[in-house]
Amino acid sequence: MGQYGTTAIEAIKLLKSGYKSAEQAWRESAEKHILAKSSRNKGCPRQAFLGLCASGLVVGVSPNTCTKLISSLNGEYSVTAVRLLVRDPNLVQKGKSKLWQKVLSEIPNTNPKKKHNEQMDVVMALWEQNLIVIDREAI
């Protein structure tokens, strides 16, 4: 698991301990787990995490923790990845790159050569820790 997956898991722990803002929990967790400031400020994995929280896809985390989230493509990527994993849990064994390619194929007008920017690290870490809500009806 990469530093962004670790950050996401720690942020969830903070939210479950009483933090009211997913953004604040992410930033505090990033301070603890990510050494480089530029990496801590990276938007793609943070927005992927916030997208999952806002969509109600994180176990034990209310969508209300993401009051400031503006619709983001990174959030859409992460929600799409969860939808794909719910449909085919075996995708997790194929790795982040394969999942990313599947995500890109699901979203119209997306460059199929686009590289993932750690959004899938967040999704895979939460999936592997059973922190994703698996509700086939909701997805």
Image (spheres, helix red, strand yellow):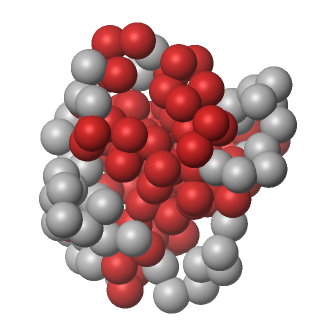
Residue at 24% in and 28% down? 89
Give above or below for 110 relative to 20.
Answer: above
Q: Nearer the viewer, residue 6 or 52?
A: 52
Q: Is residue 7 left or right of residue 113?
A: left
Q: Is residue 138 left or right of residue 63?
A: left
Can you tell which quarter of the image residue 126 is in? Answer: top left
Q: Count the numbered circles shown.
A: 0
Residue 29 visible within the image: no
Residue at 57% in and 44% down? 106
Give residue 100's position: percent from left, percent from top: 58, 29
Q: Nearer the viewer, residue 12 or 89?
A: 89
Q: Specify the quadrant that holds the C terminus.
A: bottom left
Q: Is residue 62 left or right of residue 55?
A: left
Give above or below for 62 relative to 33.
Answer: below
Give residue 62's position: percent from left, percent from top: 27, 78
Q: Specify the quadrant that holds the N terminus.
A: top left
Give residue 42's position: percent from left, percent from top: 73, 47
Q: Nearer the viewer, residue 35 or 5?
A: 5
Q: Is residue 34 left or right of residue 95?
A: right
Give residue 70's position: percent from left, percent from top: 66, 79
Q: Nearer the viewer, residue 58 or 101?
A: 101
Residue at 59% in and 85% down? 68
Residue 88 visible within the image: yes
Residue at 53% in and 69% down? 23
